[in-house]
Amino acid sequence: MMPAPPAVLVFAATDPSGGAGLQADLLTLSSMGCHPLSVVTGITVQDTTGVEDVLAMDAEWVVDQARCILEDVPVAVFKLGVLGSVEIIAAIAEIVADYPEVPLVLDPVLTSGRGDELANEEMLEALRDLILPQTSLVTPNVMELMRLAYDEAPEEERPDYARAAMEVLESGCEFVLVTGTHAPGVQVVNTLYGREGVIRSDRWERLPGSYHGSGCTLSSAIAASLAQGLPIPEAVAEAQDYTWQTLKEGYRLGMGQIIPDRLFWAREEPRNDVH
């Protein structure tokens, strides 16, 4: 019998399109050689164009799902996506506090790719107070970074992302990876911050179109790389390369955004006509 691959436990909401959310996490983790474990935090009504509605799970059900699997399977990494409610955030914070040695990757999904609201101010405050102090790495885009860092967005037209990242680090998390997909520029610049400042900054060709689940893919790829034993800076580098490849080989499944191809490496020939 072969040894088991490392197991990553994901807390996230479902996506019927398979482009984002829990399904994207499971595909990414499997593609990168991990065994995905899942706790459903919510059920969404969505397609490739956007999110229509979210039904948050009862917090007790979230706890029961997690405690049951954690009593059975050793977990290498926790990964958090859409969490659904303040009660669920508080419940998850209690669960992960019992496993301080397990790295935690937080994808702070505050809106959908279309801009649909997925976290209100009470949930944002709970994330800051309960989850960020236990987080190894948080992966906000520039808009999410501003909401995590400040109660109100800064008034200046050109916000200081470095200062905002340091504000988030003050909440207690170890690293912040600020993704530049929503920032202007010919290239996408992703910057990893630690408490001593910039750890690494990576530039990527900006691909045409918009993608459904790119943030889920990146954060899950980081979780997978951490589960495989890489330190955070190297895990971030590995995950960015994987994610960019999934976007380059993405395909249009429906009438909305492009779906990243998390199994691009398994195709006989790359699809170069998808954009």
Image: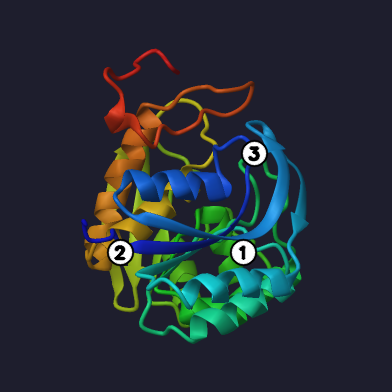
N-terminal of the pair, mark 2 or mark 1, is 1
Q: Residues within 10 Å of mark 2 (few under 14, many from 20)?
A: many
Residue 127 visible: yes
- The C terminus is located in which quarter? top left
The amino acid type found where label 2 is placed reads Ala
Q: Residue at position x 52%, y 76% from top?
A: 132
Of callouts 3 and 1, the N-terminal one: 3
Quarter containing the N terminus:
bottom left
Q: Amino acid at mark 3?
A: Pro
Q: Residue at x 64, y 46 (%)?
A: 112
Residue 194, quarter of the rendered image? bottom left
Does 35 sit above or below residue 113? below
Write the residue at 50% across / 53% down.
141
Residue 59: x %, y % from top left:
72, 72
Residue tagged by mark 3? 16
Mark 1 highlights which residue?
A: 147
